């Protein structure tokens, strides 16, 4: 979902809070996957059956894929929230997160009426 749609629906402060919660949920997922990889690697043994070996190898590969995806998502969500958070202060009166969206990229301060660009179109 576009950030502008969510910000319009929730307001910037709630949007920012939810994005940080989502980002940290992905971080925890990545951390739990690292623990799962360590546990599977400890149990991995070449003395058991081939089926058991394949299950552990599959679990390690799945946890690695999910963990890498989680850490990449964490970084992207955090970078987006930080980038928009840096532009959320009004240049006219200094109010933080007190604006309404005019268009998907432009906002207007509710306190002083100053307009600025919140979301770059890059």
Image (cartoon, rainbow, N blue to C red):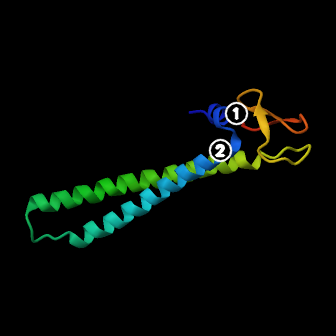
Residue 51: x and y in percent read: 11, 58
Q: Residue under label 2, please give it.
A: 14
Query: Quarter of the image containing the C terminus?
Result: top right
Q: Mark 2 to mark 1: distance in Å?
A: 22 Å
Residue 62: x and y in percent read: 30, 53
Residue drawn 73% across the image and 32% down it: 105
Closer to the chain start, of discs 2 and 1, is 2
Q: Residue 121 carries which label?
A: 1
Left or right side of 90 for 81? left
**Is residue 16 positioned above or below 108 on the image?**
below
**Is residue 108 positioned above or below 25 on the image?**
above
Looking at the image, which is closer to me, 44 or 104? 104
Residue drawn 72% across the image and 37% down it: 119
Total numbered badges shown on the rendered structure = 2
Residue 80: x and y in percent read: 63, 46
Dividing the picture into quarters, in which one does residue 67 lie? bottom left
Q: Nearer the viewer, mark 2 or mark 1?
A: 2
């Amino acid at each position: 979902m576009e950030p502008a749609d969510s910000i319009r629906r929730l307001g910037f402060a709630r949007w920012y809070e939810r994005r940080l919660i989502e980002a940290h949920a992905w971080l925890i997922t990545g951390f739990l996957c690292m623990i799962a990889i360590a546990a599977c690697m400890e149990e991995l043994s070449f003395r058991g059956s081939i089926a058991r070996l394949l299950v552990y190898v599959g679990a390690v590969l799945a946890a690695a894929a999910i963990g890498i995806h989680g850490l990449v998502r964490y970084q992207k969500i955090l970078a987006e929230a930080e980038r928009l958070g840096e532009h959320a202060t009004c240049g006219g009166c200094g109010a933080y997160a007190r604006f309404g969206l005019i268009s998907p990229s432009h906002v207007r301060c509710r306190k002083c009426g100053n307009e600025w660009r919140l979301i770059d179109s890059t």
